[in-house]
Image (cartoon, helix red, strand yellow):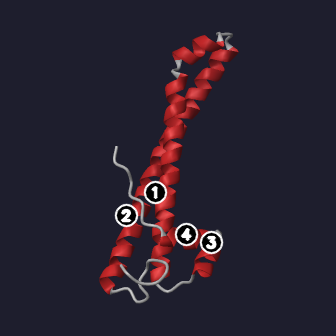
Amino acid sequence: MAGGASGIPKSPSSAQMQALRNDAIQMAREMEEAVIRTRNQLKFMETFVRRARKMIESGRPAMEIANLINAADARYATAEIIREVQAARYRAQQAQFKLAAAEGSNMAEIARGWGVSRQLVSRMVKEPTRRRRRS
């Protein structure tokens, strides 16, 4: 798509607009899935923390608790899911910024609508679309 400084053509074709719209839909779907996985992980962590608290209350040694509930794996899984949701949010936001720009919104309008800086919108619209890394 050759065109304006933003990488979005000045007058995108209907096929280009549909591709941008499809991309925004797919990125929103991935964001939604990441939020569901995050919610599930947080529910797991809620149970995990409750179990640990009850063990502490019963007087069990801290290291015994850490080993029994596999604290390292739980911490890693939670950190990983948070990174995943942040990346999905970025991709979804970028796709929506690009679609809004192609629909004729300027960077300031997009920034106001999303509550971010115009510079951030401009940078995200100009940079290539990131794709989700498949595990």
Mark 2 and 1 residues: CB-CB less than 8 Å, in contact? no
Mark 4 and 1 residues: CB-CB less than 8 Å, in contact? no
**Residue type for callout 2:** Gln
Residue 56 seen in this snapshot: yes
| 90 or 125: nearer the viewer | 125
Q: Residue drawn at (42%, 65%), measured in percent from left and top?
A: 129
Looking at the rendered image, the disc whose residue lies closer to the viewer, 2 or 4, is 4
- Residue 123: numbered disc: 4
Q: Residues within 10 Å of mark 4 (few under 14, many from 20)?
A: few
* Above or below, comparing residue 120 to residue 133 in the picture: below
- Residue 31: numbered disc: 1
Question: Mark 2 to mark 4: distance in Å?
Answer: 21 Å
Residue 8: x, y in percent? 43, 80
**Residue type for callout 4:** Arg
State which tag comes first along the sequence, 4 or 1: 1
State which tag comes first along the sequence, 2 or 4: 2
Looking at the rendered image, the disc whose residue lies closer to the viewer, 4 or 1, is 4
Q: Residue furthest bottom?
A: 11
Residue 39 seen in this snapshot: no
